[in-house]
Image (cartoon, rainbow, N blue to C red):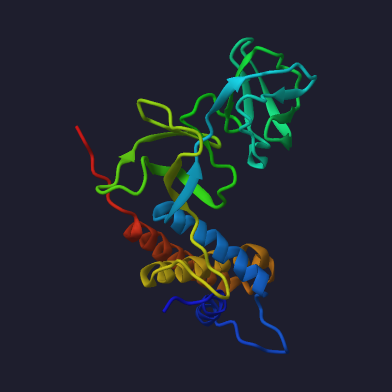
Amino acid sequence: MAKTLSAIRGIVRQFLRDEYTGNTYEFADDELDLHISEALEDISKRRPYGVKEIVYASNKSGTATATTANHLIDTVNAQFVAGDVGKTVYNSTDKTTAKVTEYNSESDLTLDTDIMASGESYTLYCYGGTNGRDLNISSITGLIGEKVEKAEYPTRQWPRDKKDVEVFGDIVTLKVDSEPADGDEVFLYCHKVHQLTESASTLTADLEKVLVDGAVALTARSWLNNMRDQIVPNTVNWYHKWANEHYTIYQKGLDSITPAKAWKF
C-alpha cells in the first residue's frame, strides 16, 4: 500500500533523528514538505507519472454571413458553442487572427480584434493553434519533461493507433496526414509529476525509498548551510560527511530508477 505524505514525513524524521521535544520538532512540516516536493520532482524527471489525457480537436470552418465589429457571425452553419471561448479564429481571406472572448449564440461569437466581414472565410482552431492538427494542453496540469510522449488517434481501436507528436509550449501537433474533424477525440500519453498527498500517492515502493533518501539528504544539506556558524567546530565535518553520504545514496537511487535508453543507429 502506498504511503501518504504524513507517513513519508514521519520516516524522514526518523532518519534525521528529529524527535518531538518541547511540543515541537526541529523541522517544521512545511520545511520537510519543501524538500519532499523537490525530491518528488527529481524522481518525476527520471521516471515520470504516465497519464492518458483526453482532448478534442478544434477545426470548425465556414463563412461570415454578416459584418458586425468584433464579432464572427455565421447563421448558415450555426455551429458555435460556449466551449469555443478562448479559441483562435483565423480569417483565411485576410490572413488575420483573433481570440474568441465571448459566446453569444450558436451563430455569434465576440472577438478581441475586429477581423471578420461578411463573405470572408474563417477557421476556428484551438488557442495558439494554426491548423486542425494542433491541440492546446494549457489546461493539463503537472506536465514535466517532454510533456507528451505519444497521441492515440483515431481512438478506441485495437491495436492502438499511436502517433508521434511535436510539442512547443502549450501546443501539441499531431503528426498525421489529414487534419482531424472538429470535436474528434484524441488521447495524449502525458508525463506528469508524481502526486503525494494525505489521501493518495502515485509512487511505487522503489520510488518511495528514493523519495525518502532525497528528502533526508536535501533537508540535511539545507540545515547544515543554515546552522554552520552555530555548530561546534569539531562536529561540522561530521555533519557535512553525513549529509554528503546521504546525498550520494540519493543520486544512486535516482540513477537506479532511470529507464535505460535504447540507442538507434
Asked if residue 257 lies left or right of residue 241, the reply is: left
Foreground pick, 88 / 211: 88
Residue 82 visible at all: yes
Q: Residue furthest front?
A: 76
Taking the spot 68% from the left edge, 30% from the top edge, the residue there is 107
Residue 221 visible at all: no
From the top left corner, tell me how far across and down residue 263 is, in percent: 23, 39
> Is 95 above or below relative to 259?
above
Q: Residue furthest right?
A: 69
Q: Residue furthest top?
A: 94
Q: Quadrant of the C terminus?
A: top left
> Is 25 above or below relative to 110?
below
> Is 136 above or below relative to 237?
above
Foreground pick, 130 / 184: 184
Foreground pick, 167 / 217: 167
Q: Quadrant of the N terminus?
A: bottom left
From the top left corner, tell me how far across and down residue 6 is, in percent: 57, 78
Asked if residue 135 lies left or right of residue 263, the reply is: right
